Image (cartoon, rainbow, N blue to C red):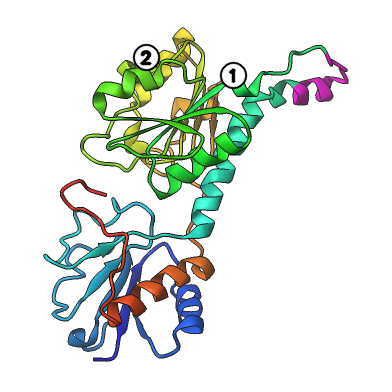
Amino acid sequence: MKPCLLFLSGSDRADDWSWAIKALMPELEIRVWPETGNPTEITYALPWKPPKGALQGLPNLKAILSLGAGVDGLLGTDLPEGVPIVRMVDTQLTRGMVEYALYWVLHIHRDMASYAEDQAKGVWNSGRPIPDTPKTVVGVMGLGEIGGAVARAFADIGFATRGHSRTPRRLDGVEVFSGDAALPVFLRDCRYLVCVLPLTPETRGILGAKLFAALPKGAVVINIARGGHLDDEALLAALASGQVGHAVLDVFHREPLAPDHPFWRHPRVKLTPHIASMTLPRTGAEHVVATIRKAEAGLPYGPLVDMARGY
């Protein structure tokens, strides 16, 4: 059977993805939901937040390729049983997340906001101390494809870098902690904490009062994972007490963020509208095509989602 891909997304441009994929695999037929044609001919699906049940009734579906690095946009959408789900691996997506995390840590680490204020006032102030980077701890929660790259980037520029993961990992230049019991020890010295966790029932709300209390006073919390990881009220309380010094937030429970949410006007919260990084058709298509070619050749492909773990 000739491979046939069904594209399902209300937030991604089907034309851009079709062009990028066809440039690499001209023989692949691409259909865009809801124009499915004969459903028995569809062998692969490329969705993000598909309508509930949209992937049912495709008897020859071999694999579901997520358009996003996370799969929370697929879970709960009535997926067909037994069909492998492949996470998106996009070099540009990973690079963008690394750039975002580096930018905000360095921006705060070097106190650039104060120098911008000095410039606006016409003040020359060269007396601020320069921070000691090798003695500054950056902690990364979640050491998957993206989190591992983020942690390595901080280690490469000289920060004392540590990471925390569900299971043991090894990363050059990174002190790795694993398991729930190690989390308080991991957090203890983190001046900067970057959350890159998958959103699962176990990680929902993990950025809460208990975690903030385990950080050194004045720590900076950066969330580039999912809004569901953060307890908003707990963060506001930790900011008010000074336990958390600053927060950088790119993801929220409700997006767009409600106009009356206190994060908008909080002096020690920096927020961006879920733009830390995005999957680009040009680079994401490489992963899509490589996966389909391997599947058609009967070769192993992935990375696959473990539905029991939710990532």
Q: Is residue 118 magenta?
A: yes
Q: Secondary structure at mark 2?
A: helix
The residue closer to the viewer here, 67 or 268, is 67
Residue at the location (55% across, 38% down)?
101
Quarter of the picture holding the N terminus: bottom left
Residue designated by label 1 = 135
Q: Is residue 191 above or below residue 226?
A: above
Task: Name the residue rendered at 43%, 38% in the picture.
Answer: 257
The answer to whether residue 165 is magenta is: no
Residue 117 in picture, x, y percent from top left: 76, 22
Which residue type does callout 2 highlight?
A: Ala
Query: Which segment did they paint magenta?
Result: 115-126
Residue 181, placed above or below residue 201: above
Image point 25% across, 56% down: which residue? 305
Residue 248 % position (x, y): 52, 31
What numbered label is drawn on residue 122?
none
Left or right: where 234 falls relative to 175: left
- Residue 40: x %, y % from top left: 17, 86
Which one is in front, 164 or 106? 164
